[in-house]
Structure formats: structure tokens, C-alpha cells
Image (cartoon, helix red, strand yellow):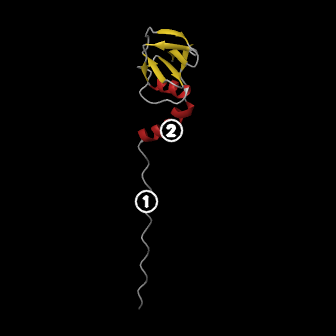
Amino acid sequence: PAAAAPAPPPPPPPPPPPPPAAQQAQRQQPAARGGRTPCRFSEDLTGKRCFGMYRAPDPAWTPASCKEQCCRRSAECGMWLYNYAEGCWFGKPKAQLNCRDEAGWFGGKTMVV
């Protein structure tokens, strides 16, 4: 008698679900990008240039990206200034800085949580 052809192997099982912590991180990731309320600053420093600040650790190409970087580093950034020619600058929280009116600068001071 002719032998029957062997049965194909069963399909591999589906991958196991991620652990609960990973599931929670996956749910929070989109919210951190766009769903979270952006931080605000109580004092608008647009049109001011302040001295005694330090250059932001990462490059920023717009006022919005400079502000967001300051928000992410709230423990060390209490104010931010941006100028298209000079880049992004941070001031320490509660720092007393020497500021003067100068066009072309954008910024904020005293983060509101």
C-alpha cells in the first residue's frame, strides 16, 4: 500500500502578549507626544534678551522646539529664549537675570505646572 503524505507541520503559535508594564508604556507613548497638555510659562519674554543663560543641550530650530526642550528639562530649565541667529538658551529656575528689550527673541519664564 502507498504511504500517505505526511501532514504539514502546525503553524507557529502567536507571540505572547507583552507584559503589563510594556502595554501601559505603549498606551502612554502617543499621549506623551500630542495628547499631553503642553507646559506654559507665566511670563512672556518675547522681545527680550537676557544675559547669564546657558545654551540648551540639544539643538532647536524654532521657538516651539526650544520651549518644548525646556519643558522636558523642567528640573534645570526655568526660562527659555530663542533667536534664529543665536539658537536656544535656558535659564535656571528662579534665576535673576539681566534682561533688556531686543527684537528677534522669543521666550518664556516661570513654568506653570
Q: Position of residue 22 (x, y in %)?
A: 43, 41
Look at the numbered disc 2 and give the secondary structure of its residue: helix
Q: Estimate how packed mark 1 is, as few (under 14), some (14 to 19) or many (20 or more) residues with alpha carbons within 10 Å.
A: few
Report helix, strand or loop for mark 1.
loop
The residue that appears at 51% across and 32% down in the rendered structure is 32
- Check the image and report above or below for 97 versus 32: above
Name the spot of residue 39 as percent of width and height, x first.
53, 22
Which residue is the site of mark 2? Answer: 27
Classify mark 2: residues with Cα within 10 Å, few (<14), some (14-19) or many (20+): few
Q: Position of residue 105 (x, y in %)?
A: 55, 19
Residue under the point 53% across and 9% down: 100
Residue at image mark 1: 13
Q: Nearer the viewer, residue 95 or 17?
A: 95
The reply to whether residue 65 is visible in this rendering is yes
Residue at 42 percent across and 38 percent down: it is 21
Q: Is residue 11 above or below residue 56?
A: below
Q: Residue at x 52, y 30 (%)?
A: 61
Residue 37 is at least partly visible in this image: no
Quarter of the image with the N terminus in it: bottom left
Going by the numbered disc 1, the residue's amino acid type is Pro
Name the amino acid, label 2. Answer: Arg
Marks 1/2 in contact by CB < 8 Å: the verdict is no
In the rendered image, the residue lying farthest to the front is 85
